[in-house]
Image: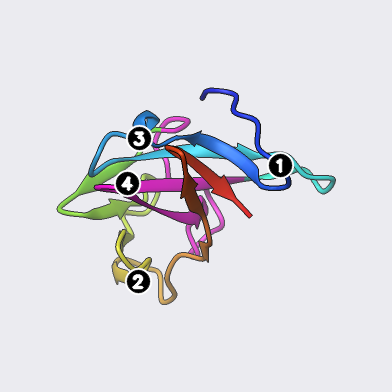
């Protein structure tokens, strides 16, 4: 991930760092240990979700920053739960709830967490 500076917002990556139709992980530092986000790109927009399966609290990526994505859905590498990237909704598997979304915005080709 590239280092990008920005006022009060937290710069996560450049839009070009996320291949269209795919997702990457962004790790966020915090005083409580931090957390990981899924950043999914659809054209010129980016959606962000906590990188955590609601079923067991495990990360969704099968390898750090690498996600199983098929037909616009992300699949939990541990349990096979399937979530729609456009909405975060649970579609299949052991999860009854969807992914937790976070707001992000784009400015000058950079993805920011407010």
Of residues 4 and 61, the one nearer the viewer is 4
The C terminus: image quadrant: bottom right
- Looking at this view, name the residue that lies furthest to the front: 108
Residue at mark 1 = 7
Q: Cα distance, mark 3 to mark 1?
A: 22 Å
Picture coordinates of residue 26 (x, y %)?
54, 38
Query: Which of marks 3 and 4 precedes in the sequence?
Result: 3
Q: Quadrant of residue 93?
A: bottom left
Under circle 1, the secondary element is loop
Circle nearer the viewer, 2 or 4: 4
Residue under numbered circle 4? 41
Comparing labels 2 and 1, the label whose residue is closer to the camera: 1
Q: Is residue 59 above or below residue 56?
A: above
- The magenta span reads 36-65
Mark 2 crowd level (few <14, some 14–19, many ≥20, 10 Å Cα): some
- Toward the viewer: 74 or 26? 26
Q: What is the C-alpha distance between the residues marked 1 and 4?
A: 23 Å
- Residue located 53% across and 61% down the image: 103
Is there CB contact under 8 Å for labels 4 and 3? yes
Q: Nearer the viewer, mark 3 or mark 1?
A: 1
Q: Does residue 109 appear left or right of residue 42 in this picture?
A: right
Mark carried by residue 89: 2
Would residue 97 appear left or right of 33 to someone viewing this image? left
Q: Residue furthest top?
A: 2
User: x, y (%) of residue 53?
Assistant: 48, 58
Q: Is residue 55 above or below residue 34?
A: below
Q: Which residue is mark 3?
A: 18
Mark 3 neighbour density, 10 Å: few (under 14) some (14–19) many (20 or more): some
């Amino acid at each position: 991930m590239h280092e990008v500076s920005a006022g009060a917002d937290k710069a996560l990556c450049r839009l070009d760092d996320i291949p269209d139709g795919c997702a990457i992980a962004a790790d966020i530092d915090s005083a409580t240990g931090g957390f990981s986000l899924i950043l999914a790109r659809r054209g010129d927009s980016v959606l962000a979700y906590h990188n955590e399966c609601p079923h067991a609290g495990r990360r969704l990526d099968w390898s750090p920053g690498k996600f199983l994505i098929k037909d616009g859905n992300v699949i939990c590498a541990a349990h096979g739960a399937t979530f729609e990237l456009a909405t975060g909704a649970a579609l299949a598997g052991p999860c009854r709830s969807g992914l937790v979304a976070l707001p992000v915005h784009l400015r000058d080709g950079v993805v920011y967490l407010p």
